[in-house]
Image (tube, rainbow, N blue to C red):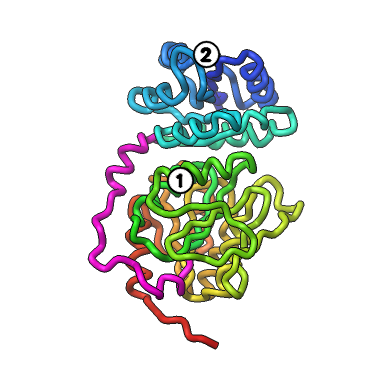
Amino acid sequence: MEPIKVLIVDDSAVVRMGIRKMLMTDPDIRVVGEAVNGADALAKQPQLLPDVITMDVSMPVMNGLETTERIMATRPVPILIVTGLDTADLAFEAIGRGAMEILGKAEINPENAREFIRKIKTLSQIKKVRNPLDVRVHCALPTPSNPVTGGHALDWIIATASATGGTQALALLLDGLGKDWRTPIVVAHHSHPELVHKFVEWLNKTTPLTVCVAEAQQTLLPGHVYVSPADRNLEISSLGRLLLQPIPPRDGIDHPSCNALLSSVVSRYGAQSIGVILTGMGEDGVLGAKAIKAAGGHVIAQDEATSVAYGMARAAVQQGCVDDELPIQAIADRIRALVDRRRVPRVST
């Protein structure tokens, strides 16, 4: 098997060397070149033909935003943005222009080599890289004649699970639901603790809903999206309040736990739970999907054609706990139909 070819783009020689050293520890990966800015990367890409590009965002001559956009328009290839906390805003803008994943520069060290290499290998498996602007065009939905408003909205919960590629997928999903959406949404997305707040800020800029980082004991509000911190597992109590639980050591590198979030919603919402498994590697979320399905709820999985990493969704489909497998641009419409059709008032006890 041919090694995975990687092009490193960063104006810092120290960062380039750090990335190179990490990648050299795996025989399945070969660094085919380095570029000191975006213009340099654009000149080298046609000759080196990398399978994956690691991209800084703040560089002289041509920054990572313009470079990402031009690569996606001319010779698309999976791009991993490598950013410092001070440039995280730009990193999420790069996601909007077609980059696939984000890694913090603080993670460039030998201790994180395994996870970094896993990201590179995951991205290299993407067979068809798409310009996200093309997907957004097809994601636009007409304003519904009967918008999801009113008291019944709080009788339902939408719980989503995502990892690799989920940044863009979640933005498309929220955008598709539209500004009139009222049912609360809770999110578990595998991320790094330093990037969660920037992720939420970016979602607030790019989607019509109110997005926030979940806090302990919050009460769910209509039209709000609650994103789990990366260093805690988000759960829903039987009283409908947000809980932040410590991550057990056995959970490994996939956190926050999608299983913990999806499994927890059924104690409060039962059959009025909708689980959504978006793009991501591994099997996190399958146990939660099973719990929702067993409680009479509904599970939707993003299809392979629109997933960056068809792992979590595939596992859920293979386990038989998925009701609908849909392209990302169709999921919001399906959720709307479910909540409207299955409107059931909650009985007080």
Marks 2 & 1, CB-CB < 8 Å contact:
no
Image point 50% across, 32% down: which residue? 91
Question: Residue at the location (62% across, 50% down)?
Answer: 229
The image shows residue 234, relative to residue 172, as above or below, that is below
Res 78 visible: yes
> Which one is nearer the viewer's eye here, 110 or 179?
179
Looking at the rendered structure, the secondary structure element under dot 2 is strand
Sequence-wise, which precedes: disc 2 or disc 1? 2
Dot label at residue 203: 1
- Amino acid type, callout 2: Ala
Q: Which residues are magenta?
A: 128-157
Direction right: furthest residue: 249
Q: Position of residue 79 (x, y in %)?
A: 48, 29
Q: Determine whether 98 is above or below 324 in the image.
A: above
Residue closer to the observer: 194 or 341: 194
Is 325 left, or right, of 115 in this rendering?
A: left
Which residue is the site of mark 2? 35
Query: Which quadrant of the structure image shows residue 178?
Result: bottom left
